Amino acid sequence: MDLLTLKGNWILRRVIDGSTRPIVLPGDILSALIASGEASDPYFDRNELKLQWIGREDWILEREMEIPAALLEKERVFLDLDCVDTIAEIRINGELLGESSNMFRAFRADAKRLLRPGRNRLSILIRSPERAAIEAGSKLPYPIPHSEYPVTSPHRNLLRKEQCMAGWDWGPCLMTGGLYDDASLLALDGPRIEYLTMDARREGEDWRLSVTAWLDCPAATRVALEARVAGGCASRDIELPAGPSSATLELVVGGVEPWWPAGYGGQRLYELVVSAGGHEARKRIGFRVLELRNEEDEGGRSMTIVVNGREVFCKGANWIPADALPSRCTSERLEELLSSAVDANMNCLRVWGGGRYEAERFYELCDEKGILVWQDFMFACALYPSEPGFLANVEAEVRHQVRRLQSHPCIALWCGNNENLGALGWYPESRNSPMRYIVDYDRLYEGTIGRVARELDPGRPWWPTSPSGGPSDFSDNWHGDGRGDMHFWSVWHEGKSFSEYLKVKPRFCSEFGFQSFPNPGTVASFAPEGERNVTSPTMEHHQRHGRGNTLIMETIARYFRMPSGQVETLYLSQVQQALAIKTAVEYWRSLRPLCMGTLYWQLNDVWPVSSWSSLDYDGGWKLLHYEARRFYEPLHLALVRKDGAAMAVAINDTAEAYEGKLELRLRGMEGEVVATYETEARLAPDSATELLRLAIKDLPCAPEEAFLDGRWVTVAATEVTVTASRRAFAFLTEPKRCSLPDPRLESSVADGPNGPRLTLRAEAPAFHVTPWAATLAGRFEDSGFHLMPGEERELGFIPARGAPMPSAVGLRAALRVLHLRASYE
């Protein structure tokens, strides 16, 4: 077997005028035009609007290949392109090798007949995706609508292309194209192993592993098939027909460590090696048993993921593509974003259906880090066709992706689409002729996607759509909270107060969110001087929700005093975003086992923008992400204000029981202790325990005159443990109603052994303390916390990937510390 990589330098040719420039592949066309100086940065100012022409033209990717004569002595020579975006014709030496019309299918073709020893030319014509979609739309027998956004490309639902490339309510419209992931020539004799899938079952202390090799053979033959993993081995001779086929081996292995989600155990992986004839394939696998409990009960219909017999509370967020420009979706970028998720105590991400099936490295990292993946198929916020050609294309896509990804222990379930069941009622066309579109829906999601997913991966849960009550359940899961997974958007889209989160008891909430403005440094990266006010044309261009800024500012007015400046406005938007999601997550976690999952919208951004994300486009942490690290802590104390009472709830997601006590102080606004409440308790494993409930009207002072400061103290045989993550604070009314004193916050920066250290100290309560260094690339170790009188916090600075560690002098010069009282005059 010989492998010749095709990664590296290619030529990009503009068809309309024949002009050429370099392009690095894997990569995308727009990124190459930026590098050549022909396109401006689409993320800066409103440059995106000037670049729409790129998706309306045809382009050619081409390169020369030096082919050794020995390579052509092999029986077959495959051209392998992992991801061709999207409508393409592939030629070698001017002869057509094949066509591609689906970004989510690998292109594989035996190219030997077109290759010759020495120099060869490979060219890939990438047709205009926008023109292709418009042409497909003109041929429809009836309209097939999709959701549209401020800058959008028409008929995106008719192309098997990353849907959010056509614009979304958080993303730009950049209809680029290119080659992504891997590109190579593979020469070999005999059969080729195209995919490996597996199923692991526990048998006492051992595991029985069924390994299936999906093969392609040029002619009928007999070969030896062998599989090795974790000290176990199985082999047999098999008869292979010409063309595609599959063969399965069973082996028993012992002494392996099971794979667990983050926070529940280790993530031990083992290398699986399978050989057939002269071809060998390798995969890293984990041993685990996963089931989805979706059962009728007193609360409705449950949704609980169970791993190795233990119920898992899924804590996480929704994942969208790492960048709107695929050239920038590097392994380093994925590592940074996924590490930030785990650092915030997340154990689950939902790969949302308007993006892409991620590159192999994404799933490898999730395997390594213990991140469960809720995997949508790539259909979102639209109706889709069901004509035979479209369904055949989708079926091939699903067969490819399921077989490609099935062996990853991180993948928890397959989900048919994002919100498309609900979309049947969104558009006038479908409301007026519902049966036509219901038939389309059933043919696509049940008759094609669901059928193939269940056929190829029967041991993994199938979830028909999100939100959904479960298979064959068509409940309204935007407003009904008792069945399956819920998308709860009443707070954001309907502008309701945060207390609305306390009126629902979802079994699993897979979407809910609240927007904020980006960090000051991010704003400076895309908005010129003079354009950084939140209502400037540039800032409004980087806000894709039609009412986004209005909802942010109206909510600030509901909870806080009006900010005194631009930076204060950014800050308060992030405080309230963190408060909104904290309100929801803490209450829903307190309901376990009724509720067993919260995935907020959204983890990351594809460009610098005002959005629902907790991580800025550059990977910087917003206040929500710091708060998520606290509210997703495995052992957590929550103070929930509901129905005129303040409740203290201890949440224990660990397998250990904890003995200890609650210490709850009612403090006046100067920090003085007005009253103290204590209670002892035992926290059972995997539980939520209400420790104390106080009627606010019975407290010895008015709600606007005091706040609650609580901590859970774990008492062990030899130690008493108090950590910041098990401390909780709560206002008893809207903060704007409270007369906050000047906390007389002092800050100092000094050099430390691993970089500069910031020390903060308050003389009176300081709420939502936020150190920002907007001109430096990086973040502080913590932010958005509270300081009580006399308390001191010391924080290190974490440079962004590739950025230098600043000096103490540099950090001091860039530093600005905000807190709630400093946000208004």
Image (spheres, grey):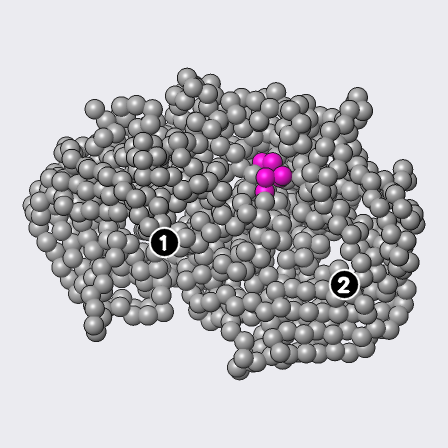
Q: Position of residue 434 (x, y in %)?
A: 62, 38
Q: Label 1 to label 2, Cα distance in Å?
A: 42 Å
Q: Amino acid at mark 1?
A: Tyr
Q: Quick check: is 348 in the magenta stretch? A: no
Indicate whether 672 appears above or below 238: above
Q: Position of residue 126 (x, y in %)?
A: 76, 34
Q: Nearer the viewer, residue 245 or 30?
A: 30
Residue that sits furthest to the bottom in the current view: 204
Q: Which contiguous range is marked in magenta?
A: 324-329
> In which quarter of the view is residue 660 placed?
bottom left
Marker disc for residue 632: 1
Q: Which residue is mark 2?
A: 193
Mark 2 residue element: strand
Label count reads 2
> In which quarter of the view is residue 562 placed?
top left
Left or right placement of residue 200 versus residue 313 in this view: right
